[in-house]
Image (cartoon, rainbow, N blue to C red):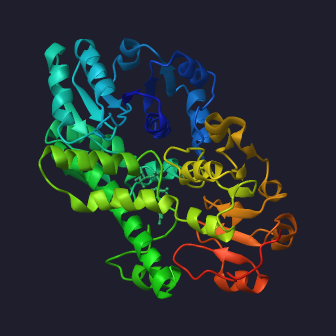
Amino acid sequence: MKIAVVGTGYVGLVTGTCFAETGNEVTCVDIDVKKVEKLKNGIIPIYEPGLDILFERNIKAKRLRFTTDLAEGIKEAQIIFLALPTPPGEDGSADLKYILKVSDDLGPLLQDYTVIIDKSTVPVGTAEKVRDRIAKNAKVEFDVVSNPEFLREGVAVEDFMKPDRVVIGTESEKAQKVLTHLYNPLVRQGNPIIFMDERSAEMTKYAANAFLATKITFMNEIANLCEKVGANVDHVRMGIGSDSRIGKRFLFAGIGYGGSCFPKDVQALAKTSEEYNYDFKILQSVMEVNEIQKTKLIPKIKDYFDGALKGKTIAVWGLAFKPYTDDIREAPSLINIKELLEAGAKVKAYDPEAAENVKNIFGNKITLTDGPYSALENADALLIVTEWPLFRTPDFGVVSKLLKNKVIFDGRNLFDIAEMKELGYTYYSIGRETVNQESEVKA
Ligand code: UDX
């Protein structure tokens, strides 16, 4: 099939590349001239494991093209994906200006029956708005479908190629047929394509992300309580996760969720509730708790140094909002670094992928190192923010040699409590006992 993807951000690029991989002819359209130039030259502007192989293969096979010209890009396309940004406006609601502008432009360009798909996360009712805008100028038949994506950064290609489910919001049988054909190669293992009306599909995306954010936040609150009552959240997680009604995934307590989706989508759903005069209480708590959770370890760091962080150097392991991405949007690392700097501490940080992005924010206010151990040299303590596998089994001999104090503040519960006890570290984590708390701070 011939497909156009408008918007070559994260979602657009993965969608376009993966559908080229299943044999379609895909043209990606973007107004950003520099970005399109890069893409044409085979450069992917985002870091996403596995995407490069598919990208190169399909460019070579001439199944994947790029253009800045909308008319050229959608020529003969049977399906047009809209994968445009929906940034939060001042009031937290999703801003639809990009999607609606392209909808206006699309109308007069359509030549034959076309299925237009909202892939961006958009508030309930957007498909209707898009349809109205296109209909103003269209001379041919078309359908607008809501088909939300559930891609996780870092594993987006795998999530795309083997989705747990595909949600398609349209009551048009014609559009359903086109999309069943398109998604057929991805659901061969028996995972379902779930058809529903547009509004339910739009709601499904928000409900999924808000539910997962709530699940994590619930566990973070259980962790906070575990610390107070002397329980271990790791055990509690396993104890409840084995119940198939609860499930094992997304139960990891830590210093809060971040990223481009959860914070934005929870906020947007709260805004939608407000617009419909519904007081969605849980969402408010989720947002509040997550903000507090992100800096959960800061008071403990301050206490450890008797409130005197001035002149102390804190090593930070992990800057990306999660492993396998260079994305730092809403990353807990940012607020932690900001608070450490405000308290007068120096920060030496390492991340395998996200250092460059963090440098753009903090400039030379922090030191970025080229490895985890160099961040520890002359540091007074270690703070772990992101659970990159590289950090899970460090050489503790080297760590204790480099760190001035044997103290670790672990926001991702990477290490075993008993092992840390034995190794003589003062070890703070989330929802577990603090180990060797009485150790002396070296002068
Ligand atoms: C998420 C959704 O999973 C995906 O379906 C949607 O399309 C986009 O938003 P993503 O933001 O890439 O994907 O990351 P995800 O792996 O879901 O993690 C989100 C955040 O939750 C991260 O900050 C992560 O550290 C945190 N998290 C996740 C936890 O704190 N605990 C967990 O158990 C799982």
With respect to residue 43, does 429 lie above or below? below
With respect to residue 15, does 221 lie above or below? below
Instruction: Give x and y (percent) for residue 418.
Output: 68, 86
Residue in the picture at 54% in, 50% down: 335
Looking at the rendered structure, the number of numbered marks drawn on it comes to 0
Towards the viewer: 154 or 355: 355
Towards the viewer: 129 or 18: 129
Q: Is residue 241 left or right of residue 232?
A: left
Instruction: Give x and y (percent) for residue 372.
Output: 77, 56
Residue in the picture at 50% in, 52% down: 158
Q: Is residue 437 left or right of residue 24?
A: right
Q: Is residue 354 left or right of residue 117?
A: right
Can the viewer see residue 110?
Answer: no
Q: Quadrant of the C terminus?
A: bottom right
Residue in the picture at 65% in, 48% down: 341
With respect to residue 5, does 281 lie above or below? below
Towards the viewer: 427 or 174: 427
Instruction: Give x and y (percent) for residue 101.
Output: 29, 20
